[in-house]
Amino acid sequence: MPGIHNGHVHLERAPLIELRDVTCGYNGTPVLHRINLAIPEGQLTGIVGPSGAGKSSLLRAILGQLRLHQGVVRVMGEPVRGRPPAGVGYVPQLETIDWNFPVTVEEVVLMGRAATSGIWPWPSRADRRAMSELLDRLGILAYARRQIRDLSGGQQQRVFLARALMRSPRLLLLDEPTTGVDIKTRHDVLHLLRELNDSGVTIMLTTHDLNAVATHLPHVVCLNHTVIAQGQPSEIFTPELLSRTYGAEMLVVREGSLILVAERLTAEGDATDDEILAPPPAALSLLQSVR
Amino acid sequence: MEILTEPFSYAFFARGVAASAIAGGLCALLGVFIILRGMAYIGHGLSHAIFGGAVVSYVAEINFYIGAGLWGFISGLLIHAVTKKRQIGADAAIGIVTTASFAIGVAVISRVRKFTKNFEAALFGNILGVTPQDLLVLAGVAGVTVVAVFFLYKQLLFVTFDPEVASTYGVNAGWVDVAFTMLLTASIIASMQVLGVTMIAAAIVIPAVTARLLTNRFATLLWLSTAIGTACGLVGMYASYYLDISSGATIVLVATLAFLVALVVSRVSTLANHSVHPAPAGNVGALFD
């Protein structure tokens, strides 16, 4: 239970990630507006919100890849300027990867140490060992010499997770780690992230999947250019807050500890963002039976 | 055997062979990074821009290598900066800057008529023009480039694959780009005598694309592309001697032939693999996007 970590946080300790009054964006157009956020060490946080709400931009701001118009971003107590401190791992969205690029799984994973492994072009023995251990742990050792396109979606996700873990991160940021993968892979990825979180790694991920991902996380931030709400899903997944986040009317069904969110379909068939949540058929029928 | 050795009785041929082999390999090595970043136009643009710098430095009586080098390096950085912005019309902006630079060169030449001979050599390549000094510079640039690629291998790979993540992982992507632009500029200038402004872009792109058809491993791609470029330089040089055709043109034509052969080979092996393996190894189509 990752949520347990919440109990150990001392208030006087500096948060691992801290954004204070951050406004930033691209070419002068702000995407994030006056963001205030403090994430304690050991937290497992999900960022949810509609497409274009600035979820990825929030991660990029934490990584120092966006010029801030205003405010300050601190990671591990240090202001981020240009690049984050060494103990940060980042897993980009899979769709940003050039899958035709001629690299093998091991070449990609070894990139995690590109800046720290000395001047020789070949990996050190320690790097090789770390890589093999990670690939083994993630169940993809057998594919080490394959070109990255020649893998399933779940295996591809794990390759880039392995690259991030090569840095032995204290903080792991993942952009849509469950998008474009099947149900089993999604389950595996979330399970893996929980394990990492239990071993002390602070994790922040973005997701547009409220039902399958966000409701299972201990801490969620609702984002729509600014922070609408944050807390446990059971507290903040209310029709009111979610409707404000998504700009569409949302239904929330609670059944014991189970939370199910859906978009209320209006008679006019409002063209809202259908990427937000497409509840699986099982969830829909459950919804109907509950109602 | 005599066909191979006979031309060597001419000193200019020996120099020409050495120069075309080195230039072919050098352009092909850097070409790998260029095709993978989808920046094939940079070779074309940079060589044309450098032509302007070369002519101006000739007229102003500045050393060719210094004048053209500075001009080319600044153009290269400009092209890089414009590309990074990713705004609409970036390629048009690059086209304007580099073609304008080329036009300056042509304009100056048409005013100062005395060096039409060199003009043609610069455009299309001329082995007769390769002096011992040119060869020395070319060998020097090639040596520095190989050493730099060797020691920057991991950084270059990461930045070529994924520049943004590379910089969040502590690789100084900006510096790697600057270093690469310097190497590319120096290589184009040093190769200009042999290959010619108009042919350099092809010598950069074709061997790399050819090698790409044959391998999925980055390290293999690097040496294979270099080997193909070197071989095309050698074969093209002989063809140039025996057929009495401009060396830049023969080298590019030989490279094109190699590409077509590789295309057929990779298609055949993909088809052969298909019956055994569900996933095709090659991804030829992506190169033509």
Image (cartoon, helix red, strand yellow):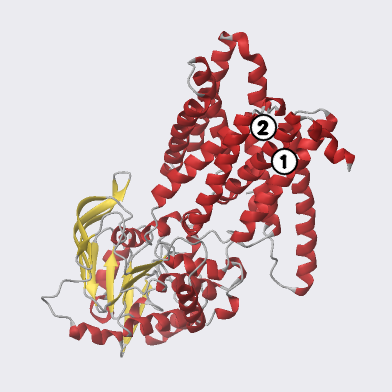
Q: Is residue B182 above or below residue A175?
A: above
Using the numbered discs, state the Cα–Cα distance from disc 2 to disc 1 in whole angstroms. Answer: 10 Å
Residue nearest the viewer, comparing A18 with A241: A18
Q: Is residue A105 above or below residue B42?
A: below
Q: Is residue B244 left or right of residue A219?
A: right
Q: Is residue A181 above or below residue B9?
A: below
Q: Residue furthest bottom?
A: A256
- Could you tell me which quadrant the C terminus of chain A lies in? bottom left
Task: Write the residue at 59% across / 80% down.
Answer: A142
Which residue carries the number 1 mark?
B233
Q: Which is nearer the N-term, disc 2 or disc 1?
A: 2
Task: Write the residue at 63% across / 56% down.
Answer: B221
Q: Residues within 10 Å of mark 2 (few under 14, many from 20)?
A: many
Please tell me whether mark 1 sits on a helix, a strand or a loop. helix
- Could you tell me which quadrant the N terminus of chain A lies in? bottom left
- The chain to which mark 1 is attached is B
Q: Residues within 10 Å of mark 1 (few under 14, many from 20)?
A: many
Image quadrant where residue B127 sits? top right
Q: Do labels 2 and 1 touch, CB within 8 Å?
A: yes
- The chain to which mark 2 is attached is B
Residue A179 showing in the rendered view: no
Residue A55 locus on image (x, y percent)? 34, 62
User: Which three-letter amino acid code belongs to the residue tagged 1?
Assistant: Gly
User: Which three-letter amino acid code belongs to the residue tagged 2?
Assistant: Val
Residue A12 locus on image (x, y percent)? 10, 75
Q: Specify the label residue B194 is tagged with.
A: 2
Image quadrant where residue B99 sits? top right
